[in-house]
Image (cartoon, helix red, strand yellow):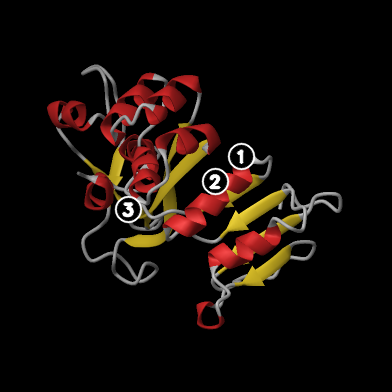
């Protein structure tokens, strides 16, 4: 929606089109009649789009066309199923895309997971020893004082006796700069890419989860349930 202005031609291939957005050319994929992501993308490239959204990159053909579109000056948004942001790179390579093409076209990867939020009406303070807080990474110094919360056993009526109410997202953002691009092009593993990204300041999914624990949004149990390796 930030990019949706009359002078910008935005085209999307979705399966299905979940929300109709005025000003955007949306196409619903229908594989039964041959209207695949790849075929829709080919048709898009003949219509001078500025921005293309591909609902999901599922196969080599779709990935190749999406990358070709990005290399010819289009801004391409898409989703890929992967464990975290650095793994997205190796997923694309596993699909058969040459590492130099991935490195040349990829700009930014955002990984996200959903975690449950603590019930604001019945959450309780969780008292953990300092050594445990240090081990979990919630504090960096024994003198640091923080208050964290946990779900109340049995919850309350407001949260349907679960201790949690609603969900929020934790994110991991990988910016593909020259150093990361060099690693991708030479065929680095996702562990090497992750290490370099963390050196450059990338916050992992788990670290983002810990921030939400410190803010009282969720519990350490929930973060460990969803994100612990």
The one nearer the camera, 132 or 175, is 175
Q: Is residue 207 above or below residue 159?
A: above
Residue 193 in which image quadrant: top left
Give the left or right position of residue 176, taking residue 151 as reference: right
Residue 141 in sight here: yes
**Which residue is label 3 attached to?**
123
The one nearer the camera, 149 or 60, is 60
**Mark 2 and mark 1: span between their CA atoms?**
6 Å
Callout 2 environment at 10 Å: few (<14), some (14 to 19), or many (20+)? some
**Which is more N-terminal, label 3 or label 1?**
1
Callout 3 environment at 10 Å: few (<14), some (14 to 19), or many (20+)? many
Q: In which quadrant is the C terminus drawn?
A: top left
**Which residue is label 1 attached to?**
71
Q: Position of residue 59 (x, y in %)?
A: 42, 59
Image depth: mark 3 or mark 2 in front: 2
Residue 146 in which image quadrant: top left
**Mark 3 and mark 2: span between their CA atoms?**
46 Å
**Which residue is label 2 attached to?**
67
Residue at the (13%, 26%) spot, across then down = 131
Residue at the (36%, 25%) spot, across then down = 198
Q: Position of residue 62 (x, y in %)?
A: 50, 58
Q: Is residue 155 above or below residue 28?
A: above
**Mark 1 and mark 3: span between their CA atoms?**
50 Å
Callout 1 environment at 10 Å: few (<14), some (14 to 19), or many (20+)? some
Asked if the residue under mark 2 is in contact with the one under mark 3, i.e. CB atoms within 8 Å, the reply is: no
Give the left or right position of residue 32, taking residue 5 as reference: left
At numbered mark 2, what does the secondary structure look like: helix, strand or loop? helix
At numbered mark 1, what does the secondary structure look like: helix, strand or loop? helix
Asked if the residue under mark 1 is in contact with the one under mark 2, i.e. CB atoms within 8 Å, the reply is: yes
């Amino acid at each position: 929606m930030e990019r949706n202005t009359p002078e910008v031609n935005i085209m999307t291939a979705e399966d299905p089109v979940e929300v109709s957005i005025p000003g955007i050319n949306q196409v619903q994929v229908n594989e039964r009649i041959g209207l695949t992501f790849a075929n829709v993308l080919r048709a898009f490239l003949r219509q001078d789009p500025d921005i293309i959204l591909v609902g999901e990159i599922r196969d080599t053909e779709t990935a190749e066309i999406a990358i070709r579109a990005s290399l010819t000056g289009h801004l391409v948004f898409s989703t890929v199923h992967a464990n975290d942001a650095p793994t997205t790179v190796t997923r694309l390579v596993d699909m058969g895309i040459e590492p130099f093409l991935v490195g040349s076209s990829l700009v930014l990867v955002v990984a996200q997971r959903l975690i449950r939020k603590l019930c604001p009406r019945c959450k309780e303070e969780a008292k953990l020893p300092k050594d445990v807080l240090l081990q979990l990474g919630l504090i960096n110094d024994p003198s640091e004082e923080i208050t964290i919360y946990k779900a109340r056993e049995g919850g309350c009526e407001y949260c349907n006796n679960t201790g949690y109410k609603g969900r929020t997202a934790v994110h991991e953002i990988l910016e593909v700069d020259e150093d990361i691009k060099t690693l991708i092009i030479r065929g680095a593993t996702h562990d090497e890419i992750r290490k370099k990204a963390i050196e450059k300041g990338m916050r992992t999914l788990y670290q983002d989860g810990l921030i939400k624990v410190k803010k009282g949004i969720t519990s350490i149990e929930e973060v460990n349930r969803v994100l612990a390796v």
